Structure formats: C-alpha cells, structure tokens
Amino acid sequence: MRPPAPKPPAAASSSSYSQSEPRQENPLLLLPSSRASKLSLGCPLLDRLLSGGLPAASVTEIAGESATGKTQLCLQLALLAPQSPLSASALFLYSDLPFPLHRLRRLAPKSCPDILDHVLVAAAHTPADLLSLLSRAQLLLAHPARSPHRLPIRLILLDSIASLFRADFDASPADLRRRSALFFQISAKLKELAYRHQCVVVVTNQVVDVVEGDAGNTVAWSSGRRVSPALGIAWANCVNTRLFLTREVDGASGIARRRMKVAFAPHLPVRSCEFVIRRDGVFGVDPAESITQSSSKQQFTDAEHREKCLQSDQTRKRRNNQHKQFISYISSHESANMLRCTLSG
C-alpha cells in the first residue's frame, strides 16, 4: 500500500509575512555621515542649516572669497571642539601667514583659560609639507595616550588648500596632471584620517572669477562677481561637502551681508542662511530678524531723507531771503545814486 503523500506546508499568513519584511528606511540615513557624530558650529541657526553640525568621518570644504569668514569659522570650531560632545583637540594647519593668534585669543572664553592647550598649530608651505604633517598627525591619532594632558585629536583644520598650489604649478598639461595627482593624494590621506579615527576634517578654499560658463564647477555671485572655488573640478571631486560663503556690500550703508550656502552634500539639500561676524564669533541671522532689520534700516533711511529735504527747504528759503535783501539793498543804492546824479546835474 502506497504511503500517503506528505501534506504541503501551510502558506504563511499575511500577518507573519508582513512581520518578516525588512523595515523600510530612508536611504540618506544609511550614509556614514548621517550616523556619525557631528561638531556644532556654536550657533543654533547654523547647526539647523547643517542638520546638527559638521559630520565626522567626512571632509568638508568651506569656500569663499577674502573677508567672507572662512578663517573665523575655523578658529571658532577649534575652540568649540574641546567643549563639544566630541571632547577633542584640534589640529590647525595653516598656509596663509601669519597665523591669527590674536583673534584666537580674543575668541577664547575667559571661563576656560586652558582651552588653547587643546589647539595644535603647524604651518604648511608646500603640498609636501602638508603630506608630511598629515603623516605625523596619523601617529598622534593612533596613539592618543602619548599626550595624557591633552584631549585626543578629532578635528583637523586646513586653511587653506589653494595657497599651497598658488605658485608652484603652471598651466601646462604635465603640471596639471601632477597637481591633480597631489589633490587625490592629499584627499585620500584626509579621508583616511577622517574615517579611521572618526575625525571632523575642514578645508578652506579660495575662489576665482568666472568669465564665461562654469565648466561644471560650483558658481555663485559674491561682491558683484561670478566666482567659483579654486582648483577646479579635480579638487571638487575630493571633498564630501562644500559650503560656499558669499558676501555682498550695500552701496548706500556700506554694510556687508554674508550668506552660507550648502553647495553639495550627501546628506543635506541645497539651502542657505545669512550670518554675521561679531567680536565674539560667527552667528546666523534669523530670516524674520533680517526682514525686521531691513525694514528698520529702510525706515531710518526714509527719516534721513525727510530730514535732508527739510534742511534743504530751510536752506533754500534762507538763501531766497538773503537774495531778496541783497536785491533790495542794490536797488536802494542805485536809486540813491540816480537821485544824486539828477540833483548834481
């Protein structure tokens, strides 16, 4: 007798199937930069622009023309790192001489007199100097116990990358290839340090004028000019996030208005925020506050205009009265002279 055929397994119910399905997640949240810790910029408005701050395990570029606030932001970050949740020291590599030590001391809070002990400063004059300093920094990051009196380094600042390539390279194809190779070598070293030691890496960059076209690079208006970050597309592919600082000066008042724009980032949309540079640091400006300030400036300008009009009316009346008195004085003297001439004749 043939044994009965085995019964097929019962079909899984829809409820059990739905429970076994993987939960859907936002793909942007799967990026390492979204899960990593972030360094605050010290201002809630700027942190909101960057969704919490500058991400670790990533290379962030701050590009902009002179006087837009690139170095100010770097100094502020260097002083915020020891007090932030990162609890880290900062390695500040600079190529533009001299180092703004006086400004750094003025920004340092009086309540933390030893905070400057956690800011390491070194000068890099050439790309070879920079690569050598990054190799030495790798030893410090790998063995933080060698400096027990100092917090581990988790912030690397480079101000600026464009200064290293300002005069050593020509526009020949051979020099351009050599320069691009150095870009990739420096970028690989920075990304290795950032990813392996969960560091926040910030690099500043200068800008060049754009005559026509953009050649695929980031372009923005600053000080009435179309500008683009220096070093071209080759360097643009070496950074994870680019923040573009622009500056416009009001011709009537002479006040500079600065904006920070997210040019590109793997975890942020393209957006911008106005900011100001004060004696105590860099801070964002609330849009509603900016509108109020603009309207108050406009009201002040209108009041000044009315005052000037009133003063010119008074000046014009005074001049008219003086002119009338002068005419009457001349007329009376002419009449007297005519009468004298008539009597003498």
Image: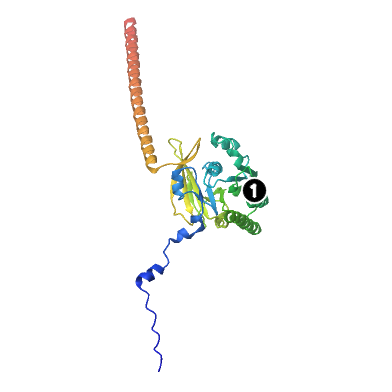
Numbered marks: total? 1
Q: Residue at x 37, y 32 (%)?
A: 300
Q: Position of residue 22 (x, y in %)?
A: 43, 66
Work out whether residue 317 or residue 75 is closer to the camera in this orientation and state it: 75
What kind of element bears circle 1? helix
Give x and y (percent) for residue 245.
Answer: 49, 46
Instruction: Tell me the quarter of the image containing the C terminus.
Output: top left
Q: How is the image coloured?
A: rainbow
Residue drawn at x 35%, y 9% is 337
Residue 312: image location, x then y, percent: 36, 26
Q: Residue at x 41, y 90 (%)?
A: 3
The N terminus sits in image quarter: bottom left
State whether residue 100 appears in this view.
no
Q: Is residue 312 left or right of residue 203?
A: left
Foreground pick, 139 / 236: 139
Residue 308 shows up from this direction: yes
Residue 327: which quarter of the image? top left
Q: Vertical placement of 193 versus 112: above or below?
A: below
Query: x and y percent of residue 171 in the render?
Result: 63, 55
- Work out whether 345 lies above or below 170: above
Q: With respect to residue 218, does 46 lie above or below?
A: above
* Callout 1 amino acid: Ala
Q: In this picture, is 235 found above or below 22?
A: above
* Furthest residue in direction bottom, as rendered: 1
Front-most of 96 and 331?
96
Q: Which residue is mark 1?
A: 145
Q: Residues within 10 Å of mark 1 (few under 14, many from 20)?
A: few
Would residue 11 appear left or right of 155 to someone viewing this image? left
